[in-house]
Amino acid sequence: MIKKIAIILSFFVFGGCSSNDRVSREVFEEVNKSMEIKKVNEADLIKEALKWGNEISQEAQEQLIAALQNAIAEKGVPGAIEFCNEQAFPILEEMSTKYNVNIRRASNDYRNPKDKPLDYEEMILDAFEYNLENELPVEPNIQKIEGGEVLHYAKVIQIPGALCLNCHGNPETEISPDTREKLKALYPEDKAIGHKIGDLRGIWSIRIPRKEVVKRM
Ligand code: HEC
């Protein structure tokens, strides 16, 4: 309908079959296209954000675990601590830039103080903790923040296996003295120890701009 009006309009303005006609029509169509507002249904938007958040968190997790396993194979567990210290943030930053989102991890029992939860992350962490304690499901979720301009994706990170306990387990029996020493030097306020398999270790916290989700629809 808008297109039709534009074409009729261009006909009048430029006098129909003048040589300008084709050019003006193109210009009008271009303008109309740029003014077209993509109508998105909110439920579909949330669904898309959730799907994308699942994909991004999966990829981020795979990258970190692969890098961690390589570092342990090359340098042993104590050596891999420096690797995590130096590389965890850059790896997530690079992925964030690639997708135009902001990917981070947050934890109430944080090791790196930069992973201390923000207010809205703390609420989600507490809800996940409650659900896990009460054996309720812990599904990834989307919250609208910043007036709906940002869709915040959250997913639990649980301790999946014994590999993690080398650095997050019982400090007396599971973390070696060398590793303990390295951890103490780099993270004097470390809270990320004493975990068991299945424990809540934190969340994936991904800020996805609404417009980036709309682009994908
Ligand atoms: C080689 C030791 C090591 C192993 C093994 C390890 N981590 Fe960590 N983890 C670290 C270090 C060091 C940090 C802090 C990274 C930083 O400074 O950015 C960390 C941070 C984290 C964080 C971010 C929150 C925080 O506490 O700062 C999560 C979540 C996490 N680890 C989960 C895991 C899981 C799950 C596993 C098992 C798959 C695992 N880690 C295995 C050393 C390790």
Image (tube, rainbow, N blue to C red):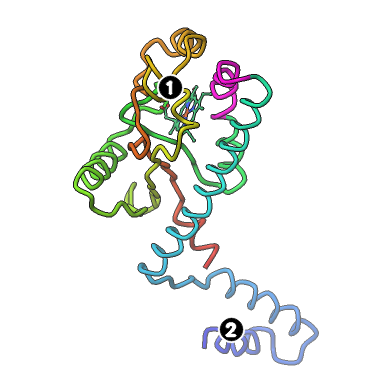
x 47%, y 9%: residue: 177
- Image position of 211 with respect to 12: above or below: above
Q: Position of residue 148 (x, y in %)?
A: 34, 54
Please name whichever residue, 92 or 75, is drawn nearer the observer in this view of the structure. Answer: 75
x 59%, y 34%: residue: 91
Please name whichever residue, 38 or 173, is drawn nearer the observer in this view of the structure. Answer: 173
- Image position of 113 with respect to 185: above or below: below
- Image position of 106 with respect to 128: above or below: above
In the image, residue 42 lies in the stretch drawn in magenta? no
Q: Identify the residue under disc 2.
A: 6
x 44%, y 73%: residue: 39
Q: Position of residue 156 (x, y in %)?
A: 37, 44
Q: Position of residue 190 (x, y in %)?
A: 38, 17
Q: Which residues are magenta?
A: 76-89
In the image, residue 87 lies in the stretch drawn in magenta? yes
* Disc nearer the start of the sequence (2/1): 2
Does residue 105 appear left or right of residue 29 in this picture? left
* Circles 2 and 1 in contact, beta carbons < 8 Å: no
Q: Identify the residue under disc 1.
A: 112
- Image position of 87 with respect to 173: above or below: below
x 43%, y 70%: residue: 40
In the image, is the residue at mark 2 within 8 Å of ligand 1 by its beta carbon?
no
* Residue at the outermost front position: 173
For numbered disc 2, what is the local secondary structure? helix
In the figure, residue 188 lies in which quadrant? top left
Give the overall secondary structure of the magenta segment. Answer: helix
